[in-house]
Image (tube, rainbow, N blue to C red):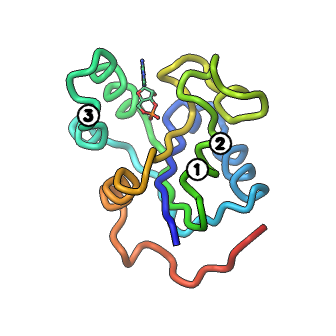
Amino acid sequence: MERTLAIIKPDGVSRGLIGEVISRLEKNGLNIVAMKMLHMSKQQAEGFYNVHAGKHFFESVTDFMSSGPCVVMVLEGEGVIDKYRKLMGATNYKDAEEGTIRREFATDIEKNVVHGSDGPQTASFEISYFFNELEIVKNSTTIG
Ligand code: CMP
């Protein structure tokens, strides 16, 4: 069974979009098996986005991700990485398809409301960055 990490970013939380995002997950049958709210330090944000260290947007995105609380979740199900990426839409909301979360709610390429792992290895690193196995529900009811 595949897992992915989903984040509602500080812009999504401060704009009151937690319910909107979670509602879309549920309506589309994506199963939430762990969830918490946290406020990353700059150092924690740098560790999370370590794969982007050295890129021109690294300083800015780690400032942004540590600027306020996020909601972090683990989603589980067959093909969940791709399913969630389709719901989010492209990183740059201008390229995102109609009806996706980023197309409807993102305000720029950085403040794009949500994050999702881009593959199984990234998912494994990102999930373990925030959750231990005891915090992930087993045998949860599948919705949808
Ligand atoms: P995310 O999917 O969380 O992965 C890295 C984040 O960096 C991305 O979403 C954006 O919030 C931010 N970012 C800012 N500028 C860029 C860029 N030019 N390319 C990719 N990501 C960017």
Looking at the image, do the residues carrying marks 1 and 3 touch, with CB atoms under 8 Å apart?
A: no
Query: In the image, which disc is placed on residue 86?
Result: 2
Decide: is 139 above or below 143: below
Q: Is residue 45 left or right of residue 96?
A: left
Q: Nearer the viewer, residue 91 or 20?
A: 91
Q: Nearer the viewer, residue 20 or 86?
A: 86
Residue 44 placement (x, y as % from top left): 25, 42
Decide: is 11 above or below 80: above
Q: Which sits earlier in the primary sequence, circle 2 or circle 3?
A: 3
Location of residue 60 (image quadrant):
top left
User: How many other residues sit within 10 Å of disc 3, few (<14), some (14-19) or many (≥20)?
Assistant: some
Mark toward the viewer: 1 or 3: 1
Query: In the image, which disc is placed on residue 42?
Result: 3
Location of residue 39 (image quadrant):
top left
Q: Where does label 1 land, which residue?
A: 82
Looking at the image, do the residues carrying marks 2 and 1 touch, with CB atoms under 8 Å apart?
A: yes
At x 36%, y 64%, the residue is 131
Q: Is residue 67 left or right of residue 98?
A: left
Amino acid residing under circle 2: Lys
Q: Is residue 83 left or right of residue 53?
A: right
Q: Give the SS element for disc 3.
A: helix
Location of residue 77 (image quadrant):
bottom right
Mark toward the viewer: 2 or 3: 2
Q: Give the SS element for disc 1.
A: helix
